[in-house]
Image: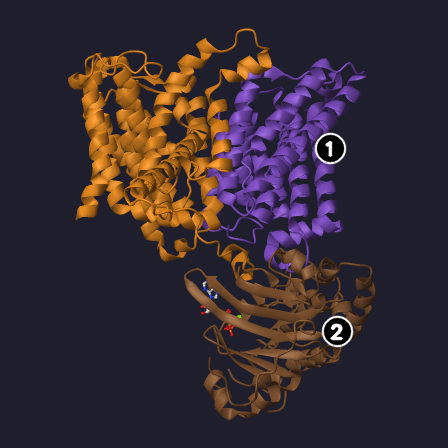
Amino acid sequence: MAMNDVISLLISGLGLAGIYFLLASGLSLIYGLMRVLNLAHGAIFAVGGFVGWAALEYLPVEPDWLRFTAALVLATLAGAMLGILIEKGLLARLYGRPYAQMLLTLGLAFAMTAFLGGWLGHDPLTLKQPAWFDEVTVIAGSRVVNSRLVIVGIALILFLATVVFLRRSKHGLIIRAGVNNRSMVMALGINVSKSFTLLFVIGSGLAGLGGVLAGVFFGSVTPELGTQQLIFAFIVIIVGGLGSLEGTALAALVVAVLQQFVNYYGPPGAGDLVTVLLLAVMLLVRPRGLLGKVAA
Amino acid sequence: MTRTQASPVRSWTASTSVLSLRNVDVHRGEAHVLRDVSFEMPPNAVTALLGRNGAGKTTTLLAVVGLLAATGRMSMAGTDLKPLKVDERVRQGIGYVPEDREVFADLTVAENLRLAMRGPESQARLQQVHKLFPILHERAQQRAGTLSGGQQQMIAIARALLNDNKILLIDEPSKGLAPAVVTEVVQAIEQVKATTTILLVEQNLAVAARLADHALVLDQGRLVYSGPMEDFARDTEATSRWLGVDIRPKAVGGRGNE
Amino acid sequence: MKRTAARNVPLAIAVALFAAVPFLSNVSVPLVFDGPLGSLGTMQIIAVGLIFAALAMTFDLLFGYTGLLSFGHTLWFALGLYLPAVLMVGAGAPFGTALLLALAACLLLSLIIGAVALRTSGIAFAMVTMAFAEAFLIFVERNPTKMFGGDEGITVAGSLLPQAVRGVAGIGTVYWIALVLAVTIYLLLRQSVGSRAGHVLQGLKENPLRVELLGLHTYRFRLLSFVLSSMLAVLCGFVYLLVARVAYPGIAGTDFALLIMVMVVFGGTGRLWGAALGGFLYGVANIRLGSMSTAAFGEGLPQWISGPLQEPPLYIGLAVVLMMLFAPEGLAGLIEKASSRLRARLAGSRRGRNSGAAPSGSGGTPGGDGTETALAASGQR
Ligand SMILES: Nc1ncnc2c1ncn2[C@@H]1O[C@H](COP(=O)(O)OP(=O)(O)OP(=O)(O)O)[C@@H](O)[C@H]1O
Ligand SMILES: [Mg+2]
């Protein structure tokens, strides 16, 4: 193993971990708080990717890093808007019936993916990334593509922001407590559904942003981007332990780095398959997941 | 309906009654757990809710808080509770101390308390709570899940004291605690009882007799006694019949039955 | 006894109708089918509908018995196509041998995967099964062994199949096989799950994915249900291979796995015939929508409208959304409501001025007991 490859693969893995975290953390907390499995989460992710692609393609903003920033902001807003519409407009009407809610989001996922595919096609659309993204930086003697560093940086900032939000804010407190025991939070006179709406919006916004990062990571976006990444997000959630943010972060790292290394050194697709194997092993030795509190 | 001969049933008019239940029925799954329960609670007094295991005591509290659906009428200080959701009912002025404490294990002690605080007056009340339970101040930054059972019970009671509540619903505060800790918890309740209305579920007859002014007794989901606590506790036939307790109430600190 | 007989009347009518199809070579159903019913093209489409009906019912077996929701049920259907195809095309095995080997392999695999996945329950089980199904799709698409055909899939030449199902004439035989498959699975499951599925699903409405009933079943019992429902799905795959004559990645992986769930939900959860109806309609509609929408829409509208209008999943997705909002009981629920209303109307007119509405036969929402919100139910222990 060349040392160069190891460092650059590690950084790639970190970037992918960030993307998984952005997708999985929202899903896991939303499920933890209200038992709503949002299957449209992946579609929101894909919409974010497309908004990012469109912004980079058409926004007349210079210099290009500013355009990229605008793309991130727009994708986040698009995700958050979708989140409000879905939660307030649709899910709230099925309050207390998580099974129907899940199926509704499944229908949305199909419809949204089909909409994107019908409008913009199913072929990959290449993102016009800032020129600097394609250049390389030498870190500890190994050449790392800059876009990887950008992804890692953004993901790290968002991870810290999420942790601070959950630890410091009142809503964060309600969310953490509610994942643990929602009825008791209600019995303290707290309107949990307000915090849930906020969580849903933030989770959807982060998914939208994650879509852009995934577009940068893979170089292009497709309507099916969301569904594909959703699977790995699921694996991350189970390996990390349902409802545990720290577990999700840790599992994202483990799954993504493992996947990167095996994909690089192994036969095609091996890295993706190994993550499923990891999941199986995890279930055999520790069904609760790395840091899980609830056995689902 | 059978009542013990201990005392005539006193009734309070709706205007003085803090909590009023009329013909309340609760089903849990297949089971018909509460049957036609009606009672009134006088203000600034402790009412003990007694009965054997599975009689429906916890169910009654859950129905009042709104965590279980119930039929019949329920009102608190003249406000109809039925149309209100759980959090809305609680904000009307209910302090709920659940049976198994239900503290948030992953949150710190301070966070557990902060979650319960509503208005600005909660801040002042926090001082009082810390005076009542100094340990909660000392251990503020410790994870609640790592506290002892008694300390967790203090968190659970403290949460109910942080707001200007009209009524406290306290479910078996002495459950699973060592005698010394029971005494501490009982003393805490005694300190607040002069100014609050409390509905207290308690298996420990000695504790109930010491704290309560009135008693309500449930048997298989039906209310079978409502009257002064003293009369009920003295009536050995009644206590053995409805609670399965033969022993005389003894000094607090002993574990009544169990 | 009488009730059983009454129960069998709709079934007998359905079977008779399907059995008549091959003989109706001059009856045509405009709009729905291109050719007359008895034409080979139409019979092929109906056969696909029957197979999907059977597949949707096998999904109900696991769900109905254990309350476990699988997001990866299609894995077994896909294996039912892929394994015989690989064995015949790649390894040159004769048809019968290929089927037997495939059955044995699937039995082993479903035992292993079931044993692992059943260590979880509820939502985690759904996620885990989805991961396994997706893993198979990845395996097929990346095709590291060069035997699974990649994106193209594996086409099975007619010459590899038995004489009876070969060529154009074979479609007739396959049609009968599909009908037998659907009816057999229906009868088998009606016997074992029928009422239970409804029962569990009533619970699911209140507190889904965490049905208390789970506690009643031992691990081995759940594993048995898992293996049985998987193996029946493999059989559906076998028959579908005879119709499609190609194993293709479109029926593997998450999207199709979720589609199976959509079929069941659309038809009506909790009723076996609802699942069958959903599967049948999907099987037929998918083929027909695909060929209709590409031709029909699009002219004159901007791309962002006309493009999506040509995507069948758009209609399926929107239909599910509407269904959840307005008729969560699915088509079967609507039909039952309508028929009980009709019966009430008939009974009413017979009895003259009896104004009291007859009790509705449909399940409806049971009086909400709100147990989900009970503190005790919310975890912590
Ligand atoms: N989740 C539930 N589902 C169905 N029945 C329940 C449930 N929880 C409790 N019950 C039943 O309701 C009845 C009353 O229970 P409840 O918890 O109110 O009793 P309790 O008087 O508080 O008893 P204890 O002294 O043991 O706490 C019991 O018969 C019990 O079996
Ligand atoms: Mg109790």
State the residue in front, B207 or C120. Answer: B207
Element on which disc 2 rests: loop
Q: Residue A15 placed where, x, y %?
A: 65, 31
Residues marked 2 and 1 touching at CB (< 8 Å): no
Image point (60%, 67%), residue name? B98
**Residue C76 or residue A198, whichever sits in front:** A198
Query: Which residue is label 1 attached to?
Result: A153
The image shows residue C302 at horizontal and vertical percentages of 60, 10
Circle 2 is placed at which residue position?
B133
Tag in front: 2 or 1: 2
Q: Residues within 10 Å of mark 2 (few under 14, many from 20)?
A: some
Of the chain colours in the picture, the one used for chain B is brown
Q: Is residue B248 left or right of residue C331?
A: right
Asked whether residue C90 appears in the rendered view, the answer is: no
Q: Kindly identify which chain the residue marked by label 1 belongs to.
A: A
Chain identifier for the orange-coloured part of the image:
C
Q: How is the image coloured?
A: by chain
Q: CA distance from mark 2 to mark 1?
A: 45 Å
* Quarter that holds the N terminus of chain A: top right
Dot 1 falls on a residue whose secondary structure is helix
